[in-house]
Image (spheres, rainbow, N blue to C red):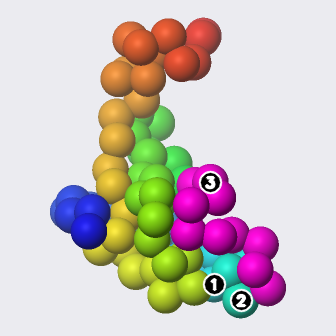
Amino acid sequence: MCQETHDHSEHLDELCRAIAPLAARGLTPATGGNCSVRTTPDEFSITCSGVDKAALTPKELVKQRMEKYFEMGVYQE
C-alpha cells in the first residue's frame, strides 16, 4: 500500500473520480500504467502500480517532486 500525506485533496479526489469510470470499462488495469495530477508547479501525485484503480482513494496516491525527475534525466527543460 502506498502512503503519503497531501495538502491538495481536491485535486486528488478529482483524479480518483476521473479514473473510476475508465477502470470500470477495463481501460486502466492495475498493472497497466499510472495516472497523475500536477498539484503544484513543483509536485505531482501519481497512482501506485498494482492498485485497483476502480476503488482508488487519495491515500493510494504518492506525492513526488518534479526536481527528482529532472535530476534523473527523465524530463528535459
The crowd level at tag 1 (other Cα within 10 Å; few <14, some 14-19, many 20+) is some
- One can see residue 14 in this view: no
Q: CA distance from mark 2 to mark 1?
A: 6 Å
Amino acid on which disc 2 is placed: Ala
Q: Is residue 72 above or below residue 3?
A: above
Residue 44 in the image: x percent, y percent?
A: 44, 46
At 60% from the left edge and 11% from the top edge, which residue is drawn? 76
Residue 42 in the image: x percent, y percent?
A: 40, 33
Q: Report which residue position mark 2 lands on.
A: 24
Instruction: Give the left or right position of residue 76, taking residue 43 as reference.
Output: right
At 30% from the left edge and 73% from the top edge, which residue is drawn? 59
The magenta segment = 25-35
Chain-order first, disc 2 or disc 3: 2
Q: Report which residue position mark 3 lands on.
A: 33
Amino acid on which disc 1 is placed: Ala
- One can see residue 59 in this view: yes
Say if mark 1 contacts mark 3, CB within 8 Å: no
Amino acid on which disc 3 is placed: Gly
Q: Secondary structure at mark 3?
A: loop
